[in-house]
Image (cartoon, rainbow, N blue to C red):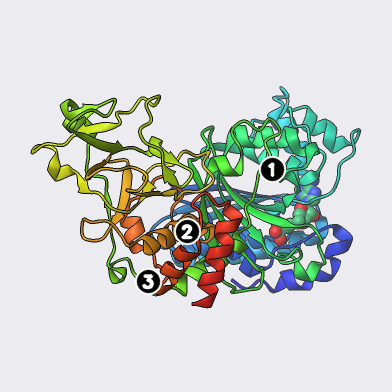
Amino acid sequence: MRIAAIENLRSRQEELGQFLTATPLADFMASMFGTLPKTVRLLDAGAGAGSLTAAFVSRCCEKRGGVGAIEATLYELDGEILDALAETMRECEYRCADAGIRFTFTIHSTDFIQEMSTCLAGDLFATHPPAFDVAIANPPYRKISNDSAERRALRSVGVETCNLYTGFIALIQRLLVPGGQLVGITPRSFCNGPYFRPFREDFLSQLELRRLHVFESRQAAFRSDSVLQENIIFHAVKGRNQPDEMLISSSSGEHGDEITETIFPFTEIVHPHDTVKFIHIPSTASHGAAKETMDGLTASLASLGVTVSTGRVVDFRLKSALRKEPERGTVPLLYPCHFNGGTVHWPKLEARKPNAILDNDETRPWLVPSGIYLLTKRFTSKEERRRLVACLFDPDEVQTAWVGFENHLNYFHASGHGLDRSLAVGLFAFLNSTVVDQYFRRFSGHTQVNASDLRTLTYPDRETLQSMGSEMNALDLSQDEIDQLVTKHLHAC
Ligand SMILES: C[S@@+](CC[C@H](N)C(=O)[O-])C[C@H]1O[C@@H](n2cnc3c(N)ncnc32)[C@H](O)[C@@H]1O
């Protein structure tokens, strides 16, 4: 949808503190909503010339068959922009009529903070607060002093905050129905500033954060407005349970540029025991670089003559054959608890898990002949730094003819037998590297690593892996040392 009026108003923006959202950015924000109800009660607070509502409407019109009616409520204090806003709403009406969507709108040329605070405070003479299914917002930002009218109004509904934008978001949150969605573009300052702590507590206790989008350049979002704030876009849903994982995306901010997306466990964004509730936004630029590196690799596991399988010993099916301690007639049985900084620590008698399994006709099909195997954990705890944790089973360390790998492990092998040492150590370095970890997180926020995930990764060729392996003189290198070694060899290949 073209909104010529928006462009004409740009020269007044700084004077008014108005940073209007350009159409491509508004479209991007509108694309971030999840499933919408049939009838959408939409809130656009601080609507300016209406580009956010226009983008939302465009999106609904393009996706025919979903939304049947949009009831838009817009708040805009600046009288001089109201004509442009009304014009944009009429364009929305035409557009919706064409798409078979019923569109109604109400423009309130009043102060959103004052009006909604009064409503929400439950003043007997005030009307009930309205309820919304969707809010799209680029709220005004300006510091509000401790004794300002805005601050007092917000305080009356329990909102303690020092900027207009967080005041807007806190009120919008209160007006959403359970499951209602909010996409907002705001400065990034609320994520970690100490002054925003009460806001963050309020926000994170009432809204489930689903996605954050960051711009790689400070001025990207509002380039033509010389805004020096770092901006962020978020998609949040009214509810009290934070998701297990969330999407972090980034782009340079140039129109039509590539968007890098990575999934992270929520606990990495807001640490569970962090009393100040900082919202940590990982750098997605390095994740983009990891993708580039991985895309440059051409070998598959199969082409390396290597297979990865899930450990064959399902312990509850072979219960009677399991032994806490090794004894005559048993062989080592390995669990993730036997991982010890790159190598296997066995037996581990203080652990709750069995250490051995009987080697007999019944169990032999579930065992593998001794050799060098690379093991990875199938499940990592959220506290673990990497999703992929690999360790080496070395028969020089654990002497045995056969060994059992329990089902919570994946093991890399060559047709059921051990691997060449330098290849196994090279794979060890590669799989434990930050590049692979970052790449892996791009498509999986789970802490689970399946054999099929490892099968579909791309790998360095055999020669590169072997030279990586030959150069590793110990398995307990630091993360930096592993990364330096892997990067050096990947760049050489
Ligand atoms: C950052 S601009 C964004 C405008 C529009 N949403 C967009 O994205 O293009 C914020 C708007 O909020 C308006 N505004 C500022 N304080 C307001 C208030 N207390 N109540 C309603 N609108 C307000 C400003 O006039 C401005 O148009």
| Kind of residue sitting beneath label 1 | Ile
If you read the primary sequence from the N terminus, does the residue marked by circle 3 or circle 1 appear first? Answer: 1
Disc assigned to residue 429: 2
State how far apart marks 3 and 1 are (Cα). 54 Å
Disc 2 crowd, CA 10 A, few/some/many (<14, 14-19, 20+): many
Quarter holding the N terminus? Answer: bottom right
Q: Which residue in the protein does label 1 denote?
A: 169
Residue 46, horizontal then vertical, whole percent: 73, 51
If you read the primary sequence from the N terminus, does the residue marked by circle 1 or circle 2 appear first? Answer: 1
Residue that lies at the very extreme toward the bottom in this rendered image: 493
The residue lying at 46 percent from left, 65 percent from top is 470
If you read the primary sequence from the N terminus, does the residue marked by circle 3 or circle 2 appear first? Answer: 2
State how far apart marks 1 and 2 are (Cα). 46 Å
Which quadrant of the view contains residue 289? bottom right
Q: Left or right of 115: which side holds 437? A: left
Residue that lies at the very extreme toward the top in this rendered image: 124
The residue lying at 30 percent from left, 59 percent from top is 419
Residue 158, horizontal then vertical, whole percent: 74, 27
Find out if the beta carbon at label 3 lies less than 8 Å from the nearest ligand 1 atom: no
For the residues bearing labels 3 and 1, Cβ distance under 8 angstroms: no
* Residue 46 makes an appearance in the image: no
* Residue 27 makes an appearance in the image: yes
Helix, strand or loop at mark 1: helix
Q: Which residue in the protein does label 3 denote?
A: 462
User: Which residue is at the front of the view, 141 or 376?
Assistant: 376
State how far apart marks 3 and 2 are (Cα). 13 Å
User: Which residue is at the front of the view, 148 or 311?
Assistant: 311
* Callout in the foreground (1, 2): 2
| Kind of residue sitting beneath label 2 | Ala
